[in-house]
Amino acid sequence: MSQRQRMQGQPMIIMGEDSQRVKDRDAQEFNISAARAVAEAVRSTLGPKGMDKMLVDSMGDVTITNDGVTILQEMDIDNPTAEMIVEVAETQEDEAGDGTTTAVAIAGELLKNAEDLLEQDIHPTAIIRGFNMASEYARGEIDDIAERVEPDDTELLKKVAETSMTGKGAESNKELLAELIVQAVEQVTVEADDGSYVTDLDNLRIQTQTGRSAGESELLRGAVISKDPVHDDMPTEFDEANILLLNEPIEVEEADVDTQVNIESPDQLQKFLDQEEQQLKQKVEQIEASGADVVFCQKGIDDLAQHFLAKKGILAVRRVKKSDISFLKNVLENAIVTDLDALEADDLGVGSVRRDEEDELFYVESDSDEAFGVTLLLRGSTDHVVDELERGVNDAIDVVASTVTDGRVLAGGGAIEVELAGRLRDYADSVSGREQLAVEAFADALELVPRVLAENAGLDSIDTLVDLRAAHEDGRVRAGLNVFTGDVVDTFEAGVVEPAHAKEQALASATEAANLVLKIDDIIAAGDLSTDKEDDDEGAPGGGMGGMGGMGGMGGAM
């Protein structure tokens, strides 16, 4: 018998013993289930009435939040498909600053609807083409529906900030915080030569402080330095101080490693100590001669130098973070000095310095109209409160900055999603082939947003959707859900305003992620690849999917 005959009927083994392979429909089901599990994990956080998640890491640290990207980043996800959906949230956060939960939820719903189409034997490539057509059309319609906003329209920008913070830890003080956020963004926004606006958020810093209520938060046209003066006898209040930023230690210069000092008598020791003291005196005299009243030093300050500085009435702070020194440079418009021998009066900046003894903070503010740099000081009663407050404010800052540079806003409360869904269904009539069904499935997926908003508010999602559709068929483009009353209202007039750019980015990210998952028909894993699935009450996948690691508890923990 020939070798060829002996080989016939025997499978060719090309993979290791521990490897696993999932193909065709099984692979698609596996991927869709994993992606939907991620979406299910965050959808209950959507909207003003969304719930929070408590996340406990391996070290026992607790995070309480309803911020989509924070939840997904903190979860110990160990499934490759689920990680692709997490990337949607991260991209949304980087590009738009907010709308992460919306983007992930839409991605999950697109895949759920795609699964129904796959069961009708519609090829994945037809679904992908249909989703791309729908996404492109929807983003074009967003631009058509969007209303223009000017960078100086403070009231409308405040509504954008308040909408972003509603339902988060910052909600209880959203009016005050929205005003501070808009003022802060306006401070770091400049008009470019072509008439567009550029916002430099690197010059906007957030400093958190526990022990007081969020209502005592404030905006400073300058920096906050969380340090103590190096000597108790130093002054801590200056209305107009000459400020030195120093990146050189005020210490005795160290000798070379190989240098040896032989001291044979007490006189020699005293002479050596006198030389060191003289060296420190000289450094302090150089600082005094420049006219400096305040020194923020990135390096150390010798104890004896601290004494000399205090005697001369100069405030000194040591071991200031490099980032704080750089920020102070922008605020005060002065140089960072690296050599005291070359120090001149022109190297100093001018500003006020005051000390908050209760919080142990220095407030450094510039008097110059051209100074660039502001600090938003956020206060909260506990660490958990202030951490969630910071996440909500960060999102609101990104949203306001995006609105200023983009110049377009939309009515919120599900209004834009229902309007787009209606327009997409009309558009689907002009699409030939099986792609038409994919466009309709895309429209259905968008309506997940108002449905989940209603569910999270304890309202009937079907009745809500019917009312919203009827309003939009009557031409009410701004009709959205007021989750507090359950009524369909003009959400734009009600102050629920969202940035158009964030919606466009959410649709683009969700579509690309869904299409990436649909295009996979073969999974080859080097190790164990569990494909056991457990359905929860709504038929969505449970935990334990595909080695989801920390997601193994997704069904129970959420």
Image (cartoon, helix red, strand yellow):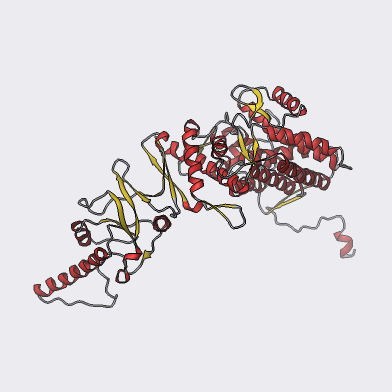
Could you tell me residue 250's position as x and y percent?
27, 64
Q: Residue at x 76, y 39 (%)?
A: 442
Q: Residue at x 60, y 21 (%)?
A: 485
Could you tell me residue 265's position as x and y percent?
9, 75
Q: Which residue is nearer to you in this view: 346 or 553?
A: 346
The answer to whether residue 475 is above or below residue 102 is above
Residue 32 visible in the shown view: yes
The answer to whether residue 459 is above or below residue 20 is above
Q: Which part of the image, by quadrant, shows the N terminus?
A: bottom right
Relative side of 184 to 301, left or right? right
Residue 296 visible in the shown view: no
Relative side of 383 to 47, left or right? left
Q: Residue at x 62, y 38 (%)?
A: 498
> Quadrant of residue 472 in the image?
top right
Relative side of 331 to 85, left or right? left
> Quadrant of residue 417 in the image?
top right
